[in-house]
Image: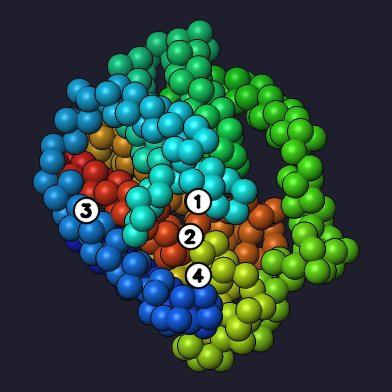
């Protein structure tokens, strides 16, 4: 039953997302490319590929990844290294995070997030009881730090935080003593402070988060325009495709801030409905993980579920001004081929776990 419910919820979110990608992007797409359907055509293509891959992957025994997790992780590490080489990777918005193949592009950090979850699930499966000692988790921490560092070299702070947070959630349900998470948190805070000091643009984002109206035409512009989109939506919204903020006020509204346009057009009721879908999806994943009799499968569900929930939480928090701008997309919803396709493949992995358990 949960298996079918997960499929249904995911497909509903993808469908709403496709509708919103068109609504949010058609004005900008016509101005930039002379084609109002430019973004939605590409998103439809990746949605189709992703859904087909989701059903194909759902037929593959998830124990396949237990055997080949290290190979998959090695491939993702190689891709992360290649993408930061000048002339090989492609830069967008100040971040060299893509391979550009002309009509399509690929973001390897999205694949790495799934690869590191599979590897971590295998590691926990093999050393679950030994994780009572921090020394037995050091090897896993080293792998995570290497991946974190490679992503930060792009730089892609949002993906790095989502990845690291997802693994921490997985480790929270192991025998690893909680006091080590306190030390880990303190170390993470110190590291964040260091990264903010090292890169002035991150300090600007923090400043804009604390007081966006302090620089309304600079670092605070995007946050202010997001709030200006959400406010007029009221209870029921201004109606589909009637957004004002997408008319060159909110930059690139089809990507990270698409939820702001959604709130403007569908209001509080629409926002509650969409958030409810995400909450229900995470509930289904957690319930399946609790009843899973295989440790590897259980941690696959926990890892992918935490990845989806943390990424959605950060994106929604950024849009409404709770968190600083990080560049994290809303799963299944925001424009982005790599994110949509690979997230749907991750869902396919979960579906196989649910079917077998």
When the figure is inspected, residue 316 is found, relative to residue 188, above or below; the finding is: below
Asked whether disc 4 touches disc 2, contact meaning CB atoms under 8 Å apart, the reply is: no
Q: Which residue is mark 1?
A: 311
Q: Which residue is mark 2?
A: 330
Q: CA distance from mark 4 to mark 2?
A: 10 Å
Q: Residue at x 30, y 22 (%)?
A: 70
Q: How far is mark 1 from mark 4, CA to CA? A: 17 Å
Label 2 CA crowd tier, 10 Å (few <14, some 14–19, many 20+): many
Q: Position of residue 222 (x, y in %)?
A: 69, 66
Which quadrant is the C terminus positioned in? Answer: top left
Secondary element type, mark 2? loop
Task: Choose between 52 and 141: the one closer to the eye.
Answer: 52
Give how far across and how far down residue 146 sits, in percent.
51, 23
Q: Secondary structure at mark 1?
A: helix
Mark 2 vs 3, N-terminal side: 3
Report the residue marked by disc 4. Answer: 254
Instruction: Name the residue that disc number 3 marks.
Output: 54
Comes first in the chain, label 2 or label 1 = 1
């Amino acid at each position: 039953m949960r298996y079918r419910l997960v499929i249904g919820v995911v497909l509903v979110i993808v469908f709403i997302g496709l509708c919103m990608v068109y609504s949010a992007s058609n004005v900008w797409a016509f101005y930039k490319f002379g084609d109002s359907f430019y973004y939605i055509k590409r998103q439809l293509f990746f949605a189709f590929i992703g859904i087909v891959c989701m059903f194909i992957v759902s037929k593959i025994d998830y124990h396949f990844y237990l055997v080949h997790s290290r190979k998959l992780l090695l491939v993702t590490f190689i891709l992360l290294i290649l993408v930061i080489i000048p002339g090989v990777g492609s830069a967008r918005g100040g971040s060299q995070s893509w391979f550009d193949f002309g009509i399509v592009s690929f973001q390897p950090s999205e694949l790495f997030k799934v690869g590191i979850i599979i590897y971590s699930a295998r590691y926990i499966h093999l050393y679950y009881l030994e994780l009572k000692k921090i020394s037995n988790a050091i090897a896993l921490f080293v792998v995570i730090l290497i991946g974190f560092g490679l992503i930060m070299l792009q730089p892609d702070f949002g993906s790095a935080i989502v990845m690291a947070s997802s693994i921490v959630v997985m480790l929270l349900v192991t025998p690893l003593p909680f006091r080590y998470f306190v030390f880990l948190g303190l170390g993470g805070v110190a590291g964040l402070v260091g990264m903010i000091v090292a890169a002035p643009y991150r300090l600007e984002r923090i400043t804009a988060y604390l007081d966006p109206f302090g620089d309304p035409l600079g670092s605070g512009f995007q946050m202010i325009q997001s709030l200006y989109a959400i406010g007029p939506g009221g209870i029921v919204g201004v109606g589909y495709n009637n957004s004002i903020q997408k008319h060159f006020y909110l930059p690139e509204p089809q990507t990270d801030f698409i939820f702001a346009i959604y709130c403007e057009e569908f209001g509080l009721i629409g926002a509650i409905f969409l958030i409810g879908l995400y909450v229900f999806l995470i509930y289904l994943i957690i319930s399946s993980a609790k009843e899973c009799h295989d440790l590897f499968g259980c941690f696959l569900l926990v890892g992918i579920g935490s990845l989806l929930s943390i990424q959605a939480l950060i994106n929604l928090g950024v849009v409404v001004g709770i968190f600083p701008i990080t560049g994290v997309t809303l799963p299944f919803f925001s424009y982005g081929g790599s994110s949509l396709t690979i997230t749907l493949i991750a869902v396919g992995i979960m579906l196989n776990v649910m079917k077998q358990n």
